[in-house]
């Protein structure tokens, strides 16, 4: 029977690797005009003449914000056009540009109203939603401006500053999408993987990236139990084990519930009744007992991380299709733990695009949200019907 615990030497190697992965990145270098032009030459976009200093100053004065230094250099090198995702700072509709600039704050207000979001630095939340919105709007008048780069990707508008991470902003789901503007353009737009290791240091917005309610790629997977056979119960235990392998965490309740489901479905393992029978006050034992169950069922596998992620993506797709995982949440999960972590494979890009469209709450009429969720499910079904894992790009 295999041990549930890795040898000490292996754990030391793992910790050493993690320390190297989490070391602070080198300081950013200022973006030069030459580097910006090289990057623009690789974009799938028409590049118009760059904005001169007078034009840049006029945009800042008209809309009341400042471009960061690297954003300013990028727009001086050339103005990407040909897609509505690129803001046209020269000839674009002023109302459209104003909406793009307002979208991050409006997204926070949307979650204040519909998801009861409340920033911990604000005064206590009023009991009435209308009063909470009024107070939140007042608090948000002082937060740093986020400036659109492309679609939902934003840079903090900090005059003279360079090297800020590029953020993907969907309401309060906010993550780093590139270490800086150059990294974002190379990796996100051109389809290569980004380490995205730089920390955001901007008032208010840092909260969402450094521990707020935005997408946390290590948070427990929000699926509902689905197993109705012993085989499915064992599969669920194994998938939870693979999630732990790639660094995801689980609420003790999830481990206990998975154990209870397996026990009810006649899965046999010596420690399973102990895991399934844990009282709430005993939940700190869940992780160790879960490992014992995995060992007894011979489910502890030394899979390479890439292989584990591909297995998990397929499982998450099946959860989306069978209704155990909401399409939007499942699409987000596959975007960040699958597509991004696996160097952005082209096979998953249609699902990522449909998830991106689903998350574009500001552009979706309420009646269309269900249709866009259905589009994610249909793409998940298509992927499950195709060879797995998909052929490499």
Image: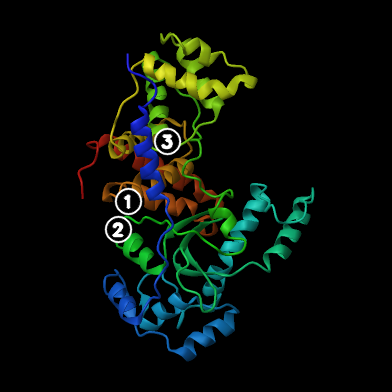
Observer able to see residue 278: yes
Tell me if residue 382 comes above or below residue 122 in the rendering.
above
> The residue tagged with tag 3: helix, strand or loop?
helix
Q: Is 242 on the left-hand or right-hand side of 112?
A: left
Label 3 neighbour load within 10 Å: few <14, some 14-19, many 20+ = many
Residue at x-position 58% and y-position 83%: 62
Q: Earlier in the sequence, mark 2 or mark 3?
A: 2
Q: Is 186 on the left-hand or right-hand side of 144?
A: left
Please name the residue that numbered disc 2 is placed on: 191
Observer able to see residue 88: no
Distance from disc 2 to disc 3, alpha carbons, whole Å, reads 25 Å
Residue 360 x/y as whole percent? 49, 56
Most foreground residue, 161 or 358: 161
Q: Earlier in the sequence, mark 2 or mark 1?
A: 2
> The residue tagged with tag 1: helix, strand or loop?
helix
Residue 205 x/y as whole percent? 58, 60
Most foreground residue, 314 or 271: 271
What label does residue 349 carry, if any?
1
Residue at x-position 58% and y-position 79%: 63
Q: Are marks 1 and 3 in contact (CB under 8 Å)?
A: no
Q: Are marks 2 and 1 in contact (CB under 8 Å)?
A: yes
Count of all numbered marks drawn on residues in the image: 3
In terms of image quadrants, where is residue 141? bottom right
> The residue tagged with tag 2: helix, strand or loop?
loop
Please name the residue that numbered disc 3 is placed on: 320
Most foreground residue, 283 or 322: 283
């Amino acid at each position: 029977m295999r041990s549930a615990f890795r040898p000490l030497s292996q754990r030391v190697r793992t910790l050493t690797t993690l320390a190297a992965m989490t070391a602070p990145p080198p300081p950013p270098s200022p973006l030069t005009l030459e580097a910006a032009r090289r990057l623009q030459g690789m974009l799938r976009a028409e590049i118009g003449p760059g904005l001169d200093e007078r034009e840049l100053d006029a945009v800042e004065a008209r809309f009341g914000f400042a471009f960061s230094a690297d954003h300013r250099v990028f727009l001086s090198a050339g103005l990407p056009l040909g897609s509505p995702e690129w803001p046209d700072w020269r000839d674009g509709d002023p109302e459209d540009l104003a909406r793009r600039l307002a979208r991050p704050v409006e997204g926070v207000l949307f979650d204040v109203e519909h998801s009861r979001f409340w920033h911990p630095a604000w005064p206590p939340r009023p009991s009435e939603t209308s009063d909470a919105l009024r107070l939140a709007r007042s608090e948000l008048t002082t937060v740093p401006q986020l400036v659109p780069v492309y679609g939902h990707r934003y840079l903090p508008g900090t005059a003279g500053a360079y090297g800020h991470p590029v953020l993907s902003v969907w309401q309060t789901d906010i993550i780093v999408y590139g270490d800086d503007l150059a990294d974002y353009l190379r990796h996100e737009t051109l389809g290569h993987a980004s380490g995205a290791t730089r920390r955001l240091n901007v008032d208010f917005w840092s909260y969402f990236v450094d521990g707020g309610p935005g997408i946390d790629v290590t948070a427990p997977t929000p699926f509902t139990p689905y197993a109705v056979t012993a085989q499915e119960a064992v599969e669920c235990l194994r998938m939870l084990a693979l999630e732990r392998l790639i660094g995801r965490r689980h609420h003790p309740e999830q481990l206990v519930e998975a154990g209870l489901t397996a026990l009810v479905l006649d899965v046999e393992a010596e420690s399973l009744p102990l895991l399934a029978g844990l009282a709430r006050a005993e939940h700190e034992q869940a992780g160790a007992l879960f490992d014992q169950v995995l060992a007894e069922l011979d489910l502890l596998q030394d899979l390479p991380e890439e292989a584990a992620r591909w297995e998990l993506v397929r499982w998450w797709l099946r959860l989306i299709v069978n209704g155990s995982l909401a399409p939007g949440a499942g699409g987000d999960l596959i975007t960040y733990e699958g597509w991004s972590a696996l160097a952005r494979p082209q096979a998953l890009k249609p699902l990522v695009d449909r998830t991106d469209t689903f998350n574009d709450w500001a552009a979706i009429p309420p009646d269309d949200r269900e249709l866009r969720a259905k589009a994610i499910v249909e793409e998940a079904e298509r992927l499950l019907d195709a060879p797995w894992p998909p052929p490499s790009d």
